Image (tube, rainbow, N blue to C red):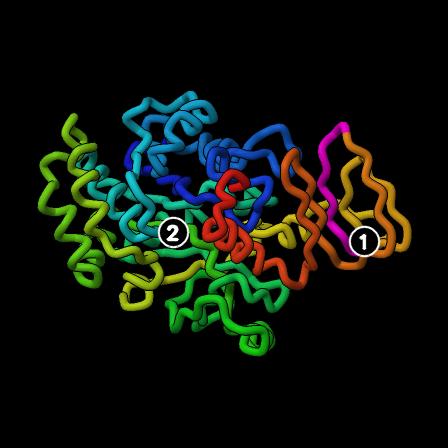
Amino acid sequence: MDNKLYLVIMAGGVGSRFWPVSRQNKPKQFLDIMGTGKSFIRHTYERFADYIPASNVLVVTNSAYADLVAEHLPELDRSQILCEPIGRNTAPCIAYAAFRLAALDPEATMIVTPADHLILDENEFRANIAECVEFARGNGSLMTLGIKPSRPDTGYGYIQISNREGISQVRTFTEKPNLTLAQSFVASGEFVWNSGIFVWQNTTILQELKNYLPGTFSLFWAEKELFNTPAEEEAIARIYPQCKSISIDYGVLEHSSQVYVRCCDFGWSDLGTWASLYQNSYKDEQGNSLDRGVITSNTTNCLVRTPEEKLAVIDGLDDYIVIDTDDVLLIYPKSKEQEIKQVTTRLQLEDGEKYL
């Protein structure tokens, strides 16, 4: 165990692209979408449990999900669940964790991970993380894990690298390019997917927040004496409404000269959409990923999820997502699945929040 190594799990999102299974009262990170018997956040915690003590884990989440975090991660004390009063994207989330760690351990090294990613080769993942920790400690760098792309996916961010193996200094970031650009990135061999998994010394990220997001940094700095005290919650309630909503990528990483990427290939997916679940699921000879109670004919390349007790009979579909829940039936072309998030926005505008 490395007592100076800390894990920060970001678990505040609502997983709107996994609607209608992921809902506001129980979002994706608390679901067993892969059918493994464990939620995403449980898998994430266990991925690091062999070398990071439970006492060195922080979970940053929406205050509405604090009880769910405690239920899924009973090893944690309630003080390790950092509650955001409102969502402000990943930069304020990481700033919150960094200021808490500064109060706990001035020599901390931080690993930041989303709560809901799939990693197939965990031994390779651990080896890559260990290399990033060593590099970050030795060089004062901001490390990100980059994934060798398997396809020109428009839903991911891309990082241009200076060499294709091992650790490379980042040249450029491009967030969710169009298909033509994504195709050129993959063909060039000079780009990797941005996994959103980061490693850095806590002092380094605090300095770069100060350099590139001074407004956000100053809000937390003004309340720094209150972190890791009973007054922290009230301080956060004052800070968050004033924070700019911005990702750590846009706010810091795209500007810093200290950013390096470890090129990795450990079987990764952010499982952010139904199509990404389809890509990582078992498929029959027709290319369908089906629940048990589904009968198909003339149907190919579809993902179908239905309640256990329900029989579904499907004919003549190709490349569709079919998701049936107690109160919502979603039938959507896989090619348009990025638009599912727009459906949830429409429901908000049209007084359909009971379905969210």
Q: Position of residue 81 (x, y in %)?
A: 33, 30
Q: Residue at x 46, y 60 (%)?
A: 194
Q: Is residue 232 magenta?
A: no
- Specify whether 141 is left or right of 266: left
Dominant secondary structure of the residues highlighted in magenta in the image = loop
For label 1, count other residues whose C-alpha is less than 10 Å away and answer few (under 14), some (14-19) or many (20+). Answer: some
Question: Is residue 47 something one can see in this rendering?
Answer: no
Amino acid marked by disc 2: Phe
Q: How many marks?
A: 2
Nearest to the observer: residue 273 or residue 99: 273
Whether residue 209 is visible to the viewer of this picture, yes or no, is: yes
- Tell which of 96 and 120 is nearer to you: 96
User: Label 1 sits on what residue type?
Assistant: Gly
* 257 versus 195 height, above or below: below
Relative horizontal placement of residue 30, taking residue 244 as reference (left or right): right
Report the side of 189 relative to 104 (left or right).
right
Identify which residue, 332 or 32, lies in the foreground: 332
Q: Which residue is mark 2?
A: 198
Image location of residue 240, percent across then percent down: 23, 45
> Which marked residue is nearer to the observer: mark 2 or mark 1?
1
Which percent across, then down, holds residue 297? 90, 50
Question: At numbered mark 1, what does the secondary structure look like: helix, strand or loop?
Answer: loop
SS at mark 2 in the image? strand
Pick the residue in front: 216 or 38.
216
Quadrant for the N terminus in the image: top left
Rendered residue at 67%/63% (across/down): 335
Residue 307 colored magenta? yes
Q: Residue at x 40, y 56 (%)?
A: 144
- Residue at mark 1: 287
Q: Which residues are magenta?
A: 300-309
Place residue 246 in its image quadrant. Answer: bottom left
